Amino acid sequence: MAGSADTLLRASEVRRRAHLILDRAKDDALTHWRYEPAAMEGVAETVASVIVENYPALDVPFHARWRHFVVGGVDHAAAFKIPHDEEAARAAFDLVIVSVLLDAGAGSGWRYTLADGTVLARSEGLAMASLDMFRAGAFADDGRSARADAQTLRALTVSDIEKGFQVSSGNPLAGLEGRTALLNALGRACQSRPGELFDALNTGGVVAAPDILRAVLAHFNGIWPSRLSLDGVALGDCWRHSALDDLPDAPGFMPFHKLSQWLSYSLIEPLQWAGLRVTDIDGLTGLPEYRNGGLFIDGGVLTPRDPDALSRAWGAADEFIVEWRALTVALLDELAPLVRKRFGKSEDEWPLATILEGGTWAAGRKLARARRSDGSPPLNIVSDGTIF
């Protein structure tokens, strides 16, 4: 890939274009949202209080799928964390790639019940459902091994996911067809298994985090539903915004690659367990989704110009949503140093991945619960299970 399309598949370009939109917000020149900079300190204080609550020793890990496998203080995925074991790393890649692709918004009504009776919802429920399926061999060719094989992924049906995720008429899961289609497409994108991506990255002992994203997009960008393309290249989680129409290169496009970046963050630790050194973690961006983005709405940093906007249903392609997501990416960059300052931490000590985990995602969820009885996000976005 070369040229404009290649540029849009880089985390650095996600960040650059998001900040261009924030610059417009600072001039009060956006169509859909107003930016209230005075509210940023209050949001930073909220995030800091959540960090102390969740990590009193300030030993904050990276934001990653692995956090959602810890329930009631028990790490249900501990068996995959084997130092310097390449096959364990491939299995960890298998697990986390499949689990992240199943991690779109669940909807407010879905629940997952563990074998011990613990009832989970949202991200933790989705994570444990995918882990239980994985350990039971639901993604393996032999039907029993803890791995994911391309042939089985290609053949998965909606009924398989319904069964594994305990879906019923009384326990509906949003975007079920989209999730299944993603796993089918993942199978088609692999020669043997998703974990083969580990071998593509395990070439020199050191890997930069933005290069993890590049590898994820090179291997898997074609699995996403066809939306926008440029120069014949499918762009995945990339949308249009008129504030970028005057750019000389790829005008009007605003890329995010949210799930691909979420996956990239989640692959850092398996690479480290295998003995690789991961650098430039802040080269990835913040994740523009319900909790991080909801934090800025519920915290008063972002206010829609249309007072009825929060009561409407929106599509991911609507400029109102694209604008909000771009602002979320840029504002997370501006929020991170405010949070670090409160703890005397440097960027090296607490990269953005730590701020997200400690952090903005949890604070967004906390504010949502305080403002709405069901803890739902402040925005209603129609999801097909392939974006958020």
Image (cartoon, grey):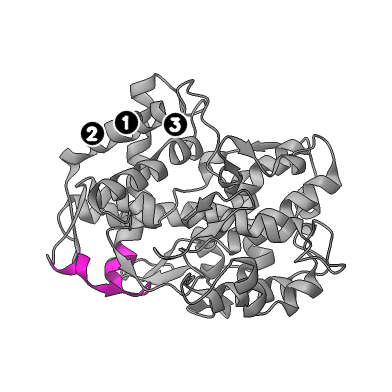
Q: Which mark is residue 54?
A: 3
- Residue 158: quadrant of the picture: bottom right
Q: Is residue 240 visible?
A: yes
- Residue 3: quadrant of the picture: bottom right
Q: How far apart, in angstroms, are the residues tagged by discs 2 and 1?
A: 7 Å
Q: Which secondary structure, mark 2?
A: helix
The amino acid type of the residue labelled 2 equals: Glu
Residue sitting farthest toward the front? 117
Q: How many marks?
A: 3
State which mark lies toward you, 2 or 3. Answer: 3
The residue under label 1 is 338
Mark 2 and mark 1 lie on one chain; the one further toward the N terminus is: 2
The amino acid type of the residue labelled 3 equals: Asn
The residue under label 2 is 41
Nearest the eye: 168 or 132: 168
Q: Kindly indicate whether the residue at mark 1 contacts the one at mark 2 (C-beta within 8 angstroms).
A: yes
Say whether residue 295 is left or right of residue 216.
Answer: left
Nearest the eye: 247 or 241: 241
State which mark lies toward you, 3 or 1. Answer: 3
Q: Which secondary structure, mark 1?
A: helix
Q: Residue at x 35, y 75 (%)?
A: 315
Q: Where does the magenta region start and end?
A: 308-323
> Quick check: 84 above or below 143?
above
Mark 3 and mark 1 lie on one chain; the one further toward the N terminus is: 3
Residue 20 coordinates in the image, percent (x, y):
31, 55
